[in-house]
Amino acid sequence: MTGAMETSFKLALKKPPSLRTAEDLHTIYCHLYHMDVLSHLREHQLRSMCTSARYERHEANHILFYPDSIATCWYILLTGSVFVKEHMYLARCCFGKQLGGRRGCECITLEPSEMIVVDNGSEGDDGFLQREGSQRRSRRRFRRVNPRGEREVITDGQEPSGYNTDYVNNQRRCWKKWVYVGLPHTVNTLLSTGTVGGK
């Protein structure tokens, strides 16, 4: 993403939904479409998200929500990192997905962080929040490996001619790191201690 494209994307997200133009909605859609973390959503779900998703930026040690907070939205991290329930989430991950009820945990930014805030249900299919990663095979675009071992990208229901191989899961799992409670809330310290293991 070039600097100009990123700027136009953020400016569109900062506008109140009622003031967004068709160009703004198209800009937001194009960026959301190319996010791997959203690749399991259909076009109408992404377009629905474009009308209400918003941009937020917070400094380090900002508390996004408390254990008693009611879950009304979820987040897509653009830059920075956050700590939620013994996990650290990095840029291009989503977190906070929950269908209502109290959060039950605290979420804090570990460094200056930018994010997209998505209201629950704005993607038009609450059921996707409960699907396991293995069930989130992309319905918009996915990859297959042909008999020669080459990858090819398929869009929606389009089938490649002459190939009958199984789907290859193209869902990149968000890089989650287990973090032990009590470590300093800075990314550099967490990574340098060697106590953070990948999962």
Image (cartoon, rainbow, N blue to C red):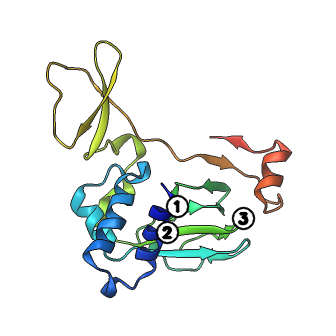
Classify mark 3: helix, strand or loop.
loop
Q: In this view, does 37 lie above or below 198?
A: below
Whether residue 122 appears in this view of the structure is no
Q: Which of marks 3 and 2 is in front?
A: 2
Q: What residue type is labelled 1?
A: Gly
- The quarter in which the C terminus is drawn is top right
Judge left or right: residue 165 versus residue 17.
Answer: left
Q: Which amino acid does label 3 sit on?
A: Leu
Q: Are marks 2 and 1 in contact (CB under 8 Å)?
A: yes
Which mark identifies residue 3?
1
Separation of residues labelled 3 and 1 (CA atoms): 24 Å
Separation of residues labelled 3 and 2 (CA atoms): 23 Å
Q: Name the residue under label 3.
A: 110
Separation of residues labelled 2 and 1 (CA atoms): 6 Å
Q: Which of the two residues, 122 or 152, is positioned nearer the viewer here? A: 152
Coordinates of residue 64 in the picture (x, y in percent): 61, 75
Q: Mark 2 points at which residue?
A: 7
Q: Residue drawn 28% across and 19% down?
A: 146
Decide which of tag 3 and tag 2 comes sooner along the chain: 2
How many residues crowd mark 3 within 10 Å: few (<14), some (14–19), many (20+)? Answer: many
Coordinates of residue 182 in the picture (x, y in percent): 82, 60
Q: Which quadrant holds residue 84?
A: bottom right
Q: Which quadrant holds residue 194?
A: top right
Q: Which of marks 3 and 1 is in front?
A: 1
